Image (cartoon, coloured by chain):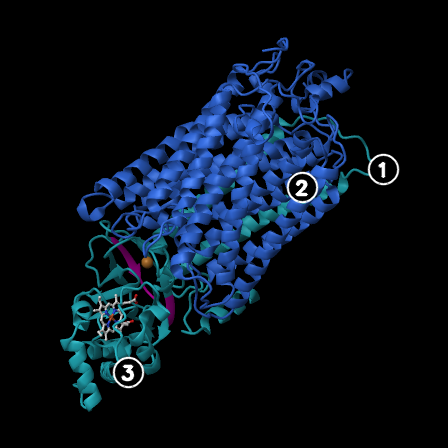
Chain colours: A cyan, B blue
């Protein structure tokens, strides 16, 4: 238990101070799995201890040494064979029972409900739609704590996998095979998630955050996302807005080829977890995305320092 | 045939070994012993290559946000590492031992089809070279395949992998597949047709038995892979749509095809290893294997069940609870015969007189390490645990406990056991023990911690990771372990080199073992048994020969 606590501490005080520990569940679904997992580990650990003991005892007791008795030529025992066939079968039937129960709790049926969220996985970033309000965001999923939301998953290209260990099961996102899953966090907190199916170059930087907020705060966030971001005021901001809206950026960033940037400044990370969202990092990213995410689909436009400064000034207002 | 035929040894056609000298005598050989040695050397070469790839990956992962390898290169490396270790190391190493040992163990003169034997080997080697040739393809999209060893579509389709890497992967594996299938057919024919008089199928050494079951599995499942590979190749080169969801194909279909082959493949890699263990543990315990019939029958059960568990690799795909449950239950079921084996090997130790040779140490290491891998496999069969831990470092740890802690340990046990027979000299035991302990320590240091990393949310196949607390330290420990492991392999190579030159002369039967390969000289003469095969009245002909007053037959009657 102590070790477990220490590990939770480890997992939670990270760069994103986000929990990604499968045994520190923050939802009923994850709790059910964690329980089954711990129980199974204890059961399997006991078997391993038994085998280890039997082997060690035998090799010490029956080691070859001067005066050791000659090896006994015996060929087996039907009785023992039956015992070590039947006992494991019985114990596995018990484990199968727990498995079924945990499956139902950790992945409740999803039919007959409209999805609250649609998550589209792209090569190396996540697009999140709130079906009821129309809000679109990226790489960051806000949910009200204590409420179960139904998510529908789509892939824009290859197979990805949605995995937030503290919240429950992972699920593959297969092109042509939409999947659905209830997600939920019963405690306010930030949970780290990632793509768990190898999906090409930047699979390592296809992370996301699930931010579970008290319902009031969640509603406020939603309102902010629905509001138009403030208009640019300073010269830099205006120049930035011009570049952003009139040059190439919107070809991708309004067309789901890249993440929606309307409220970029309200997000915590950039490029699906590769960077913390700070003005310095944003500038560095715009100058050379490949430095942080080599192979990503955001091109390097060789922007001049002035343009970068202007874009950063503008994007930083987009709360 | 110049010599008179020895009446009680059988072997396909007979060939005149022309007096070729040097490397030509190897390249042109159809002798199962020479081919067996070449299999072993070839797969050991690829083991070094695959191991170096692994070391480079571990260097990259030693620290968070590391830039030692680019993601492009890292992704090629893990793809090639996995493909190499499965197709070019473990399977051919086991086939190599089988090619060398099976004819000897059943008292035959050669394999049933010696020429086919040579074909199997060379096709397999050229398949491997074809695969590695992909590194030489240049350009932005050049290089080796970077899609993982199971090459999931549509990532492996041209839309996402436009370079030729995946084509080389397909063609290389087709070659390897053909080589493996023909080897399987040859082993089946050999074991069924060429057993010396007296050796009924229920008297064959367990290594032979398990090799035969494996060979059947190979013949049943390798063609599934080859069919899938051809479909993928048609998709890629002729624009078909088998696995392309955007134009009516199915990405899930590839997974079914791949794992219908891929899971039995795991047993192809472990059953012959079980066979080696079933030879080594009894010999160094001074006892017959405990429960021969049950060990043999459980192998059959495993082989059948292995055909019905493939979708436990697909629990995360979202194919429905009923579907998942079917494969969960079949996967639980396969644990039972596997457990039966573990218990029988353990029981063999009891009331024995255990000699701690290096071979035995590796076999005992196998027993415990494989048990860890097998048990974490049971955890994966419990569907919700799989939903959490699959595709994480927990699964990386699991496969390495099975394939390294299991198969590789067994292979090392086999090398120390049979090296005297193959070379005529003993492998140095002192170096051997250093090798064993370094392997055991390095292996556990590398992989045990990865279970924890998986639980903390580290996905597999990532070229780097953020500086989450504890991750740097744990990954560094794992990297250090990998270097200890690499160092142990160096020791092993030094040992081989020294022992080949100045090892003690082995004699026919240095271990007091009982199976037929120990009845002939070390190394055996070209046609294996110049003085004929000893009479076979039980499972341990050499025991019977040495103890005419209490042969196995007599002792078994006593028990009944
Ligand atoms: Cu992905």
- The label shown at residue A66 is 1
Which region shows up in magenta? A179-192
In percent of width and height, residue B33 lies at: 59, 26
Whether the magenta-drawn stretch holds residue A184 is answered as yes
Chain under numbered label 3 = A
Q: Is residue A229 visible?
A: no
Left or right of residue B470, residue B238 in this image: left
Estimate the spatial distance between the alpha carbons at disc 2 and disc 1, rounded to whole Å: 30 Å
Q: Main secondary structure of the magenta part?
A: strand
| Residue of label 2 | B496
Task: State the residue in front, B507 or A161.
Answer: B507
Image spot of residue B109 (x, y percent): 59, 18
Q: Earlier in the sequence, mark 1 or mark 3?
A: 1
Relative to B147, does residue A241 appear above or below in the rendering?
A: below
Is the residue at mark 1 from the same chain as the one at mark 3?
yes
Residue found 53% across the figure and 38% down from its top: B42
* C-alpha separation, residue under disc 2 versus residue under disc 3: 62 Å
Q: Please tell me which residue is depicted at 41% across the width and 39% down the height of the picture.
A: B262
Locate residue B267 relative to residue B25 in the image: left or right: left
Residue at disc 1, secondary structure: loop
Classify the position of the N terminus of chain B by image quarter: top right
Label 2: few (<14), some or many (≥20) within 10 Å? many
Q: CA distance from mark 1 to mark 3?
A: 83 Å
Label 2 CB, ligand 1: below 8 Å? no
Which callout, 2 or 1, points to the residue nearer the camera? 2
Q: Determine if marks 2 and 1 fall on one subunit.
A: no
């Amino acid at each position: 238990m102590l070790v477990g606590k220490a590990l939770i501490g480890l997992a939670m005080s990270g760069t994103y101070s986000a929990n990604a520990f499968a045994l520190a569940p923050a939802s009923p679904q994850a709790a059910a799995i964690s329980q089954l997992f711990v129980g199974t580990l204890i059961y399997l650990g006991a078997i391993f201890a038994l085998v280890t003991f039997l082997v060690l005892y035998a090799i010490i007791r029956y080691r070859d040494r001067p005066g050791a008795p000659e090896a006994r030529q015996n060929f087996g025992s039907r009785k023992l064979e039956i015992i070590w066939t039947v006992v494991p079968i019985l114990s596995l039937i018990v484990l199968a029972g727990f498995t079924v129960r945990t499956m139902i709790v950790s992945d409740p049926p999803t039919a007959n409900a409209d999805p609250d969220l649609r998550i589209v996985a792209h090569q190396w970033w996540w697009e999140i739609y709130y079906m009821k309000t129309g809000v679109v965001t990226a790489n960051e999923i806000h949910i009200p704590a204590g409420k179960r939301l139904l998510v529908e998953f789509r892939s824009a290209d290859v197979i990805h996998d949605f995995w937030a260990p503290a919240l429950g099961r992972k699920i593959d996102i297969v092109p042509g095979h939409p999947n659905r899953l209830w997600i939920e966090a019963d405690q306010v907190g930030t949970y780290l998630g990632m793509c768990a199916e190898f999906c090409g170059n930047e699979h390592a930087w296809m992370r996301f955050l699930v931010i579970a907020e008290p319902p009031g705060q969640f509603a406020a966030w939603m309102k902010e996302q629905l509001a138009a971001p403030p208009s640019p005021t300073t010269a830099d901001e205006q120049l930035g807005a011009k570049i952003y809206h009139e040059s190439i950026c919107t070809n991708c960033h309004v067309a789901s080829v890249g993440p929606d940037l309307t409220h970029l400044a309200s997000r915590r990370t950039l490029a699906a977890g590769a960077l913390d969202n700070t003005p310095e990092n944003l500038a560095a990213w715009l100058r050379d995305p490949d430095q942080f995410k080599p192979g990503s689909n955001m091109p390097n436009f060789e922007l001049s320092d002035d343009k970068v400064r202007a874009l950063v000034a503008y994007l930083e207002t987009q709360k | 045939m110049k010599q008179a035929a020895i009446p009680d040894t059988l072997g396909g056609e007979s060939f005149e070994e022309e007096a070729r000298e040097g490397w030509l005598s190897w390249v042109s050989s159809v002798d199962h012993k020479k081919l067996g040695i070449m299999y072993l050397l070839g797969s050991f070469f690829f083991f070094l290559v695959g191991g170096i790839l692994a070391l480079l990956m571990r260097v990259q992962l030693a620290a968070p946000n590391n830039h030692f390898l680019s993601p492009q290169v890292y992704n090629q490396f893990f793809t090639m590492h996995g493909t190499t270790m499965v197709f070019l190391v473990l399977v051919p190493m086991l086939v190599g031992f089988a090619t060398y040992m099976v004819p000897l163990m059943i008292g035959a003169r050669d394999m049933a089809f010696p020429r086919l034997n040579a074909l199997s080997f060379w096709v397999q080697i050229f398949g491997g070279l074809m695969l590695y040739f992909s590194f030489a393809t240049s350009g932005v999209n050049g290089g080796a395949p970077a899609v993982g060893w199971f090459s999931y579509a549509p990532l492996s389709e041209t839309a996402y992998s436009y370079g030729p890497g995946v084509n080389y992967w397909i063609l290389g594996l087709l070659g390897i597949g053909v080589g493996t299938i023909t080897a399987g057919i040859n082993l089946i024919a050999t074991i069924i047709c060429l057993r010396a008089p007296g050796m009924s199928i229920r008297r064959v050494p367990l290594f032979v038995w398990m090799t035969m079951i494996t060979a059947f599995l190979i013949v049943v499942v390798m063609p599934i892979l080859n069919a899938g590979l051809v479909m993928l190749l048609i998709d890629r080169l002729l624009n078909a749509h088998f696995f392309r969801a955007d134009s009516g194909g199915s990405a899930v279909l590839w997974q079914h095809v791949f794992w219908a082959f891929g899971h039995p493949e795991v047993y192809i890699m472990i059953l012959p290893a079980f066979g080696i263990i079933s030879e080594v543990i009894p010999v160094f315990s001074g006892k017959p294997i405990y429960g021969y019939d049950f060990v043999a029958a459980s192998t059959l059960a495993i082989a059948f069940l292995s055909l019905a568990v493939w979708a436990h690799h697909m629990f995360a795909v979202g194919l429905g609870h009923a579907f998942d449950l079917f494969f969960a239950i079949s996967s639980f079921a396969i644990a039972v015969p596997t457990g039966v084996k573990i218990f029988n090997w353990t029981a063999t130790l009891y009331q024995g007189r255990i000699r701690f040779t290096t071979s035995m140490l590796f076999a005992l290491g196998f027993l415990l390490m494989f048990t860890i891998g097998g048990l974490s496999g049971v955890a994966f069969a419990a569907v919700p645990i799989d939903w959490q831990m699959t595709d994480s470092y927990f699964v990386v740890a699991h496969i390495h406990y099975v394939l390294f802690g299991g198969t590789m340990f067994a292979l090392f046990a086999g090398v120390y056991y049979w090296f005297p027979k193959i070379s005529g000299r003993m492998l140095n035991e002192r170096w051997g023990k250093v090798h064993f302990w370094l392997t055991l320590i390095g292996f556990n240091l590398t992989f045990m911690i990865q279970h924890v990393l998986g639980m903390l949310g580290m996905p597999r196949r990532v070229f780097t990771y953020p500086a989450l607390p504890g991750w740097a330290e744990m990954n560094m420990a794992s990297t250090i372990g990998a270097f200890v492991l690499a160092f142990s392999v160096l020791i092993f190579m030094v040992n081989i080199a020294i022992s080949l030159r100045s090892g003690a002369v082995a004699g026919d039967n240095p271990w007091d073992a009982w199976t037929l390969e120990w009845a002939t000289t070390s190394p055996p003469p070209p046609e294996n048994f110049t003085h004929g095969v000893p009479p076979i009245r039980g499972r341990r002909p050499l025991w019977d020969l040495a103890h005419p007053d209490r042969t196995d037959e007599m002792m078994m009657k006593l028990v009944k």
